[in-house]
Amino acid sequence: MFKNFLKDLRKKDKNIENKNNDSCEERITGQVERKADGDSDVISINRENNISIDSNIIINKAKSNTETKNNSKIANRFNNLKDFYTPVFSGKRNINDIIKSYVAETDNDEVFNELRLRYLSLYLFKLKITNERLSIKQLEEYIYKMSNPNAEVKKVILNENIVDDRLYIELKSFLQNQIKSLQNTRMVIEMDRLILSVFLHYNIYKMEQDFFIRILFKLIKEMNLTINITELTEFKAYLEQRFLYINNIQFWESEEEKLYHCNAYFMGRYIAINTADANHIISNLKEGTLNVFATEMDIKNNHEKLYSLYINGTSFIVNINDKDRLLKYYEYINEQIMNEVNETIKMIKDSIPKIHSELFDMIENYLDIIVPSILLDREEYIAFEHLISYNSFIAMQLLDSSVEERDNIIDKLREDREFFDKINSFIDTSYEKFVKVSGKYLNIPEENYSCIIWLLIRKAAINYFSQLWDKEYGIYLENSNQIMNLDEYIDMYCRCNDIPTKNIAPVGMLTYYLISKNLFPSDYRNNFLKCNALVINKVFEKSEKIELELFEKKLTKQQSIQATQYTINDIDLMDGHEFERFISLLFSKMGYETEVTKGSGDQGIDVIAEKNGVKVGIQTKCYSGRVTNKSVQEVVAGLSYYNCEKGIVITNSYFTNSALDLAESNGVVLWDRDMLRRKIDEVINTKL
């Protein structure tokens, strides 16, 4: 019956004049809108067949509408239709099954009867199969499309004025259905995704259907879909650049581990695969450029080279021409992506001058409670940047660390659980909270909050740690403010006996101080990690040079008087009081005025050394075992008692890890066995 209906329908279509279609269409639509409380021109249906519209599908039904003259007759007929179709539709819960049963059980001459279609529309709506009542026009087209799924779009051009109107309704319905489907699955609604689904649905692979593109553009503007294009010519140019179709290539389905012959549609971040069995769209929505590369395969097809082409996890087998087309295409797409990324970065940076001053005050206060090693220890710095940015390409563009540095730190994060927990705990318990609190002061998208906060913290850290450096160590470097050369400052720093010059904290603070003085090359752009690496290299080079100079002095200096020399082994033989007096001697030779405190009740300070108005409290530990954090605690307590600005613990042994951590957090300097040996050689054994 269904085939006969189609045959009769096409026969009738040939005898109907196109000029009657428009007036009939308007009249039918008008009646439906009045009688069905304003039926919409929206079809909320979901289908995947390639469907298009024959130019003669709408039948003139003027003669079949005479029954609408009498309301009572209409009511009776409506009830009769209800009685007739209720058992027909029973148990069916999707639009395809209902309409198929409608066509199968309805006489050919009555399929497009207005009253029957009105009942069908009402039935679909009441069962919530459609979101709103379908118009007569929509149902007529849908019935025809179900019956003619293989019609091609190119057949629609017979009567442009009529066809445009019908295609407009169909295309609008499809777009709305796609949008609802994306919304239901909480997927991003992007223009490229929608356009690609349209092209796949209608089998569009060339930009030759001008009427189709014109209608698509009209709908995009009317539906307020996001696109920064105002003219049709721009839209066509956009499609020509963004859309690529390649037929007869092979697609590797990784889950099934199977190759499929397919036609492929490419649109920006999206790929549509059209195989003999199904269509599906692959999304590459992760931020940043797409990773695309090709490798030549060992196999050949009719002596033609074949290539494996990889696009963000999706693989194809292509010939050399298609390989070149795809690589060139994605070079353009990645260029466009980077343009968008750079615009976002510019937006983030441009927002900084507009930020309320209260946020800058909060950042200054935050630096007082932050774990300082995050900003001073390059390994922790890089690990922190990796953990706050690994899923954001835009954030990665605003970091100090390079991709290589972040890749290298991943192994340490995996292998050193304590290291990972320290960084991750700081992010969870402190940094993320600060980002959330700061959000109300920012006028940028929420996903970029962390980017700008970390950027602002790094800028504030330059001034913060520069001042801390000046306060902690500036007193040891006379006339340092007059130095305008990086190498000269490093030389003075390395020759200072009062600073543990190779320790992480002072080297980190020195780096910020030198950044604030603009002593680094211009291409370093205040990048802490680049500047810190340069400082570390120069410190080690200069320290090695100084050690060689001292060694040379030992060998060449003529001694008229034989003086006592000390080795670390001599120190090991001393008792506690002898060690205190020796340290006092050491510091006096370094230019300090020294005093050994009384033996008992010394409040944790054994020697007081003063130079340039700065008092240093020193605790000495002549031990065979490791010195614990108790000594650090005692020095911290004794500093206030003796009004000392700086605390030092000196031992002929080494320190426990807890002592090292506590000293770093309290600004206490530690001299272990290696440092003491070096100072003895530099200060005592060379001054003979």
Image (cartoon, rainbow, N blue to C red):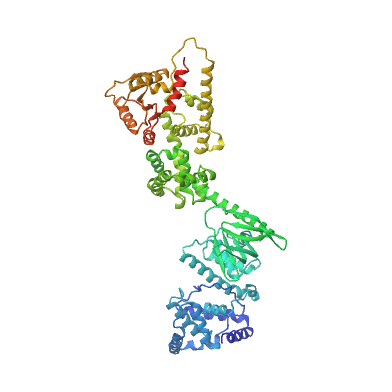
Please name the residue shown 47% across and 39% down the image: 378
Query: Who is closer to the viewer here, 128 or 224?
Result: 128
Q: Position of residue 489 (x, y in %)?
A: 50, 27
Residue 63 location in percent, x, y? 55, 88
Q: Is residue 231 above or below residue 97?
A: above
Residue occupying image coordinates x 50% and y 80%? 97
Q: Pick the quarter of the image with the N terminus.
A: bottom right
Q: Quadrant of residue 238?
A: bottom right
In screen coordinates, is 210 left or right of 646? Answer: right
Residue 564 higher or lower than 348, as above or below? above
Given the current orientation, which residue lies at the most extreme top position? 560
Q: Is residue 175 above or below residue 375?
A: below
Looking at the rendered structure, the number of numbered marks drawn on it comes to 0
Front position in the image: 450 or 617: 617
Residue drawn at (51%, 21%) of the image: 550
Q: In this view of the protein, can residue 486 be seen by the observer?
A: yes
